[in-house]
């Protein structure tokens, strides 16, 4: 079961960025005080921790035209029970993000519990009223590079419990309003949450080496200009 840390982690390391020269690029920056390579330089390894700032992370994301050819949602197997503890990914997120813990019963059924949906600042007291949203939707991930991944990589993406920003418990209404839209097309109704949302979106794209298209890039730059240039740490998955 994961423990969700503070969103958009703030560290004191100096920030720098780099762009990986691989079929699916990943943003990179100073790690453990080491100098970052130039764009197109050394490949970064999965599991490596990267520290950068919001705006530099956006700058480092490769801008590539999106392509949804061949996308089907079933290409991303999700809500698995990776640790075989009887709780699916969905339930693991619900347990981790409850503001008042639910009772976990037989077959990981949940009763009670309280959640706050950050997208619309709605308090919910029924687990069935929540959806688990992929911060970067599955279709958007496909468009941005996941179409070239293996089935195992897409499954790992769809069930990413190692990155607390990747999956988030929100009201079903807000999740279905978002659907597969990117930041140029949809933002959370709760305006106070929007800078966190942009930071988390950028962090997930960085973690998984996903690209952005030109319209998305323009929106990220424009919106981030009104946000604190937060320092963010990302553990690379690829």
Image (cartoon, rainbow, N blue to C red):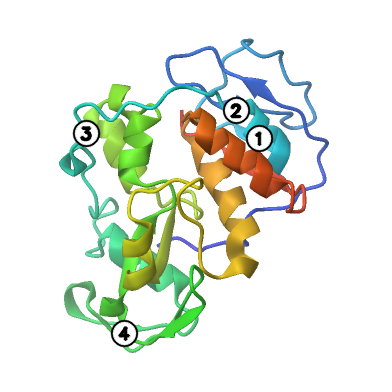
Q: Are marks 2 and 3 in contact (CB under 8 Å)?
A: no
User: Disc 3 and disc 1: Cα gap in Å?
Assistant: 27 Å
Q: Are marks 2 and 1 in contact (CB under 8 Å)?
A: yes
Observer able to see residue 219? yes
Q: Nearer the viewer, mark 2 or mark 3?
A: 3
Q: Are marks 4 and 3 in contact (CB under 8 Å)?
A: no
Q: Judging from the image, what secondary structure is the residue with disc 1 in? A: helix
User: Disc 2 and disc 1: Cα gap in Å?
Assistant: 6 Å
User: Disc 4 and disc 1: Cα gap in Å?
Assistant: 36 Å
Q: Of marks 2 and 3, which one's residue comes earlier in the chain?
A: 2
Q: Residues within 10 Å of mark 3 (few under 14, many from 20)?
A: some
Q: Of marks 4 and 1, which one's residue comes earlier in the chain?
A: 1
Horizontal and vertical percent for residue 78? Answer: 24, 49
Q: Residues within 10 Å of mark 1 (few under 14, many from 20)?
A: many
Residue under pointer 4: 126
Residue under pointer 2: 27
Q: Of marks 3 and 1, which one's residue comes earlier in the chain?
A: 1
User: Disc 2 and disc 3: Cα gap in Å?
Assistant: 25 Å
Q: Residue at x 54, y 26 (%)?
A: 26
In this rendering, is residue 99 above or below 202? below
Quadrant housing residue 167: bottom left
Q: Residue at x 44, y 52 (%)?
A: 135
Q: Judging from the image, what secondary structure is the residue with disc 3 in? A: loop
Q: Residue at x 23, y 26 (%)?
A: 69
Q: Nearer the viewer, residue 183 or 97?
A: 183
């Amino acid at each position: 079961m994961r423990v969700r840390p503070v969103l958009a982690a703030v560290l004191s390391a100096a920030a720098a960025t780099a762009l990986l020269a691989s079929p699916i690029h990943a943003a990179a920056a100073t790690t453990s005080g080491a100098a970052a390579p130039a764009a197109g330089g050394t490949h970064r390894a999965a599991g490596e921790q990267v520290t950068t700032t919001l705006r530099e992370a956006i700058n480092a994301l490769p801008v590539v035209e999106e392509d949804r050819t061949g996308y089907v949602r079933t290409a991303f197997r999700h809500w698995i029970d990776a640790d075989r503890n009887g709780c699916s990914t969905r339930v693991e997120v619900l347990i981790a993000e409850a503001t008042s813990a639910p009772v976990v019963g037989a077959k990981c059924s949940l009763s009670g519990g309280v959640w706050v949906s950050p997208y619309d600042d709605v308090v919910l007291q029924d687990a069935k009223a929540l959806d688990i949203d992929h911060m970067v939707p599955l279709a958007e991930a496909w468009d941005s590079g996941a179409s070239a991944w293996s089935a195992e990589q897409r499954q790992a993406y769809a069930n990413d419990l190692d990155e607390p920003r990747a999956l988030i418990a929100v009201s079903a209404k807000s999740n279905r309003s978002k659907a597969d839209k990117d930041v140029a097309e949809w933002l959370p109704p709760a305006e106070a949450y929007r800078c966190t949302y942009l930071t988390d979106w950028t962090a997930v794209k960085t973690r998984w080496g996903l690209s952005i298209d030109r319209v998305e890039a323009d929106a990220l730059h424009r919106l981030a200009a009104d946000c604190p240039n937060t320092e963010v740490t990302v553990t690379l998955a690829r």
